[in-house]
Image (cartoon, rainbow, N blue to C red):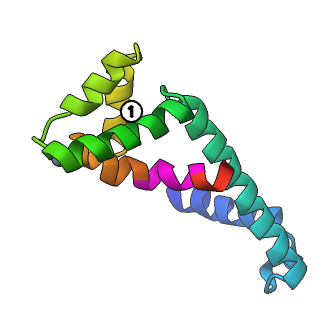
Amino acid sequence: MTQGDHRRGLIFGNHRASSPMKLAMPTKKEKRRRKGLQREIAKRQMAQAEADRPISRSHLRDLFNYLDEELSAEGCDRSLRFTSRFIAKNGLPEEEIIHWLDEYGGNCDCEVLANVEEEWGESFQLRL
Ligand SMILES: [Zn+2]
């Protein structure tokens, strides 16, 4: 069997797999169903992100408040000095949290406040 035959076989396979109904425009009911699925997926991703977060919701909220106060008094020196201080004061796992913050674009104190709070701050308001 040549490469071309193989590819054709795959295409045929796909056609057989999807029913003719699915080629038509989705109905309103179908659209609603898909929206529901998307919400379900988003919820699951949120739960996963939640499970991966190495700092509790309340500590994170306290951290944002702390950074807010310290930064408006002293400003950011492009390090995570206030974040580190908060972590140490509360006996939290520093390495994990710094790594986690970095994933959300929090490379210094003001970025934690700007980027990480943007990502997580709103979910507090929605859920609390
Ligand atoms: Zn900064």
Q: Give coordinates of residue 87: x percent, y percent.
A: 35, 22
Q: Is residue 20 magenta?
A: no
Which sits in the foreground, 115 or 36? 115
Q: Residue at x 49, y 48 (%)?
A: 120
* Extreme residue in the top direction: 91
Q: Give coordinates of residue 56: x percent, y percent.
A: 54, 29
The segment highlighted magenta reads: 118-124
**For this view, does 15 lie left or right of residue 81?**
right
- What residue sits right under mark 1 in the picture? 100
Q: Amino acid at mark 1?
A: Trp
Which sits in the foreground, 72 or 38? 72
**For this view, does 93 lie left or right of residue 3?**
left
Q: Residue 34 appears in which quarter of the rendering?
A: bottom right
Badge count: 1
Q: Is residue 122 magenta?
A: yes
Q: Main secondary structure of the magenta part?
A: helix
Q: Residue at x 12, y 41 (%)?
A: 78
Q: Give coordinates of residue 8: x percent, y percent.
A: 63, 65
**Residue 106 in view, yes or no:** no
The 10 Å Cα crowd at callout 1, few under 14, some 14 to 19, many 20 or more, is: some
Relative to 106, residue 33 above or below:
below
**For this view, does 40 lie left or right of residue 95?**
right
Q: Residue 97 appears in which quarter of the rendering?
A: top left
Which sits in the foreground, 111 or 65? 65
Which sits in the foreground, 20 or 56? 56
Q: Residue at x 38, y 47 (%)?
A: 116
Relative to 106, residue 123 above or below:
below
**For this view, does 33 lie left or right of residue 69?**
right
Q: Could you say whether the residue bearing mark 1 is in a helix, strand or loop?
A: helix
Q: Residue at x 31, y 47 (%)?
A: 68
